[in-house]
Amino acid sequence: MLLDFNKLGAWKWALSAICAVMSLFLLLPILFIVALSFGNSRWLIFPPPGWTLKWYEELFADPRWMGAALTSAKIGVIVMVISVALGLLASLALVRGTFKGREVLRAFFLTPMVLPVVIVAVALYAAFLRLGLNGTLLGFVIAHVIVALPFAIITITGALETFDPAIEDAAILCGASPWEARLRVTLPGIRHGLFSAAIFSFLISWDEVVLAIFMASPSLQTLPVKVWTTLRQDLTPVIAAASTLLVALTVLLMIAAAVLRKGKSE
Amino acid sequence: MFSAAAPRRGSGLGFAMPAILLLAAFFVIPVVFLLTRSVTEPQLGLQNYATLVGSSTYAKVFFNTFFVAGVVTLVTVLIAFPVAWALAIMPARWSAVVFAIILLSMWTNLLARTYAWMVLLQQTGLINRMLKAVGLIDQPLQLTNNLVGVTIGMVYIMLPFMILPLMGVIKKIDPAILQAAALCGATRWQALTRVLVPLATPGIASGALMVFVMSLGYFVTPSLLGGTANMMLAELIAQQVQSLVNWGMGGAAAFLLLLVTLGLYAVQLRFLDRKEAA
């Protein structure tokens, strides 16, 4: 009877209580930062003695924070485009290809996801020192595409696997060229997968810290690098303000992803 | 079948080429190159590995890494099992709320989450003041810049990675098996320990292995909540390369981390997947 919620008796309440405590454990720190960002205590006293927007003013008035946010957005968008494009091509090869070793190739594509990112970061750092790519936009983009690509490939192959290739064949039989069929039949058919892959790729780049710490230079840094360097000095409430904006963005993108999923199931 | 009538296409390997070339140039070659430097710098030989294994400073780093990863995995499993179990059988409208909280936490910026714990756990932080207010402690506890802080911060980050797969495994268990256990006279506790937990073990084991491996190579949370005195392996690699410019030692430490990571994944593929298939 342990898998029937209503027949659990007293255990039902125990399980619900554990669930509730764990939810609070996950949720409260996030709400805590949001509250602190509006609190007027520089020493992060909670509950704050009063409320203010000055940390946001400080954040928006500082060209370094704004510059870092702009850099992050720029890199995120470029990474998103490249990662979805390469991911789509690779997924077509993995799902529709007829060559041998497709499973090995799939495993190869996913390795950057399973290796500790610090190893990738240190290895790329060494390579980029030689190539002069450290502290450049291109360096950041390459590093982030490497770690975003596995997620794009997982999402897009998932969408392609549920899309019946017979529909593409039918288009070809009706006179479409293979490329026309891919572009005008298959692509629209898997658009939800492509959108999810785009959101994932952007978020991975936008939030990525470890690679970015190694790629950054004093003149070019992303938002997470700026947060990281500031955090190592002190715990200023400006970070709470920046974090709150990041949480807001996350919530927006989660809603976007949920709407996409809903659109898919209809 | 239409496939015979469909026009011939190439094998499709060409489509994968851009991704293959990118990964070869900026992933495979740099990683291989880094690992070779561990045996070529400062001179050819295994001296870097000898230093890593021989010195007590590095022994402490290895101990910290495996100890924290072990404790984090254990705590995560103990919390995640009841939560995943509840989520698998709860009415949908409740589980949707818990699920949304898990996803929100998972997708919230890692630094923002770590910052929250740095503030909460500091000497004058909310946790210490609450413990003091209820009379549990007289002096504030040292909760950051040590392994306690790292463990709390890491459990917070790893929980979703354990709960979500485990929930999938428990959902797949046939409730009839547990009904059968009850009909055969098993008490609730017996049904839990002799039926439900054993049936969920493949999921627990693979989730635990994933959390353990991820914790071993974690960089951000240990360096912010642990401080330099409680270094873990990923920080050691970064420090050797960035501050000490000792590529030989950095490469050697990276190779050990890589070996352990791939070794544990191999265990997972070899034993756990087979068990699930059986």
Image: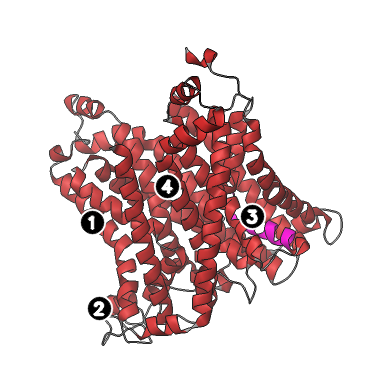
Q: Name the amino acid type tagged 3.
A: Val
Q: Amino acid at mark 1?
A: Ala
First to last magenta residue range: A115-128
Q: Which mark is residue B135?
A: 2
Q: Disc 1 or disc 2, which is closer to the eye?
A: 1
- The chain ID associated with circle 4 is A
Image disc number at residue B30:
none
Q: Earlier in the sequence, mark 4 or mark 3?
A: 3
Measured Cα–Cα span from mark 1 to mark 3: 38 Å
Q: Which residue is mark 1?
A: A20
Tag of residue A196: 4
Question: Is disc 4 surrounded by few (<14), some (14 to 19) or many (20+) residues within 10 Å?
Answer: many
Distance Cα–Cα, label 2 vs label 4: 49 Å
| Residue for badge 3 | A120
Say which amino acid is labelled 4: Ser
The secondary structure that dominates the magenta segment is helix
The structure residue drawn at horizontal position 28% and vertical position 75%, both measured from the top left corner, is: B136
Q: Chain of mark 3?
A: A
Chain ID for label 2? B
Compute the Cα span from label 1 to label 2: 25 Å
- Establish if B218 lies above or below B175: below
Task: Tell whether B38 sits left or right of B271.
Answer: right
Against B89, is B124 above or below?
Answer: below
Give whichever of B244, B184 is nearer the camera. B244
* Residue B147 lies in the magenta stretch: no
User: Which of the marked residues, 1 or 4, is nearer the chain's N terminus?
Assistant: 1
Residue B211 located left or right of residue B138? right
Instruction: Assign a secondary structure to mark 3.
Output: helix
Q: Secondary structure at mark 2?
A: loop
Tell me: B180 left or right of B68: left
Is residue B109 at all visible to an observer of this figure?
Answer: yes
